[in-house]
Amino acid sequence: MAFFRFSWKRFMIKTTRAKFLRPPLEVVDAVPVFSPPDRYVDNYQHIASDHVKAMESTGHNPFIDESLWLELEESTRVLVDKYVPDGARVLDVGVGLGRLLGSMDRLQRFGIDISMDYLKRAREKGFEVAFSKIEDMPYENDHFDALVTCDVLEHVIDLHACCLQLLRVLKPGGLLILRVPYLDDMNAYLDESLPYEFIHLRSFDVPSLRILFSKIHGMRYQEHTFSAPYLKDGLFRLKLFPRDSKVARLAREANSPDHPLWILRNVAELCHEDYRDWVYSLQKSHPALLREMLPELADGLEVNMVFKKAGVANETD
């Protein structure tokens, strides 16, 4: 990777919207670097490099189907549109390729990541970028109107330190919009054959996120939304249905083994595999019926959460 010397004074002139507490360690290809190499950074750059190479050679994401990726992004983008006004200064924490906010030129967009491959592509989409772990964020206090972070918090080692930095750079009254995997199956990440040392390091649910950001860090919970329910072998979670739910009501109408919902009458006696196979069969034979029932049959793959920092923003900033 090519390195070159860069005048700090000249750098500040070229990035007048970004206010840093300290100069970068170095500048690489016009990207200011605030985090040194370490075991965690090297691991993440390995993941990002494999991602970008696969995208460039095949046109496909090696880690997730494109249709699902788009669906997840849109579930968060709806909240950005709802909560973040035009002209707001927004930091995408873990900006990746810059896809989430890439089309939102109504915003002042900043991004941090620890992959040069990602940052260069985000910069092409109009972001001001910096190479930095969350724990090393270089920005001044109370600098951003909103923070967006998607598929990031499950990866970090020191979650508490990261939360402190997020709160530090967010203005009073500013918004944090996050998306994380919902009730992730952590057993998958114990597989010693995986090519990466660190992948997902924790699992989240709605109560744990509310405790973390509201009770511990004093933010005000605004709302949460789920991405669409997702069918995948390792993600099936058998849910108990309320007596008056649509699924329970439909199941009571199943009066013979030929009825497509007959198996629900005995669902408590089924093993995971039988239940999974039945859902996939229903997907083929009665897709419209499955779509109607899916919100009660399966969880969303990821959850979006919105929190507001206490206080009132300085309107003159």
Image: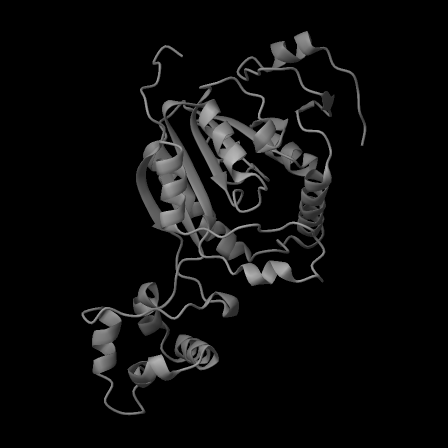
**Quadrant holding the C terminus:** top left
Residue drawn 66% across the image and 62% down it: 191
Which x, y percent locates residue 130? 62, 26
Please tell me which residue lies in front, 57 or 204. 204
Q: Residue furthest left?
A: 244
Q: Residue at x 67, y 43 (%)?
A: 44
The residue sitting at 71% across, 29% down in the picture is: 36
Q: Residue furthest top?
A: 9
Q: Position of residue 111 (x, y in %)?
A: 56, 30
Please determine whether, in this image, residue 310 is positioned above or below residue 267.
above
Quarter of the picture holding the N terminus: top right
Q: Residue at x 41, y 75 (%)?
A: 283
Work out whether residue 176 can be spotted: yes
Where does the image place residue 253, in percent across and percent down from the top left?
21, 83
Q: In terms of image quadrants, where is residue 264?
A: bottom left
Quadrant of the rendered structure where residue 42 is?
Answer: top right
175 relative position to 128: left or right: left
Image vertical order of residue 72 relative to residue 29, above or below: below
Horizontal and vertical percent for residue 227?
Answer: 40, 53
Tell whether 102 sits left or right of 207: right
- Residue 102 visible to the viewer: no
Query: Which quarter of the figure has residue 251?
Result: bottom left
Q: Nearer the viewer, residue 265 or 316?
A: 265
Q: How is the rendered protein coloured?
A: one colour
Residue 202, compared with residue 261, is above or below; it is above
**Total marks in image:** 0
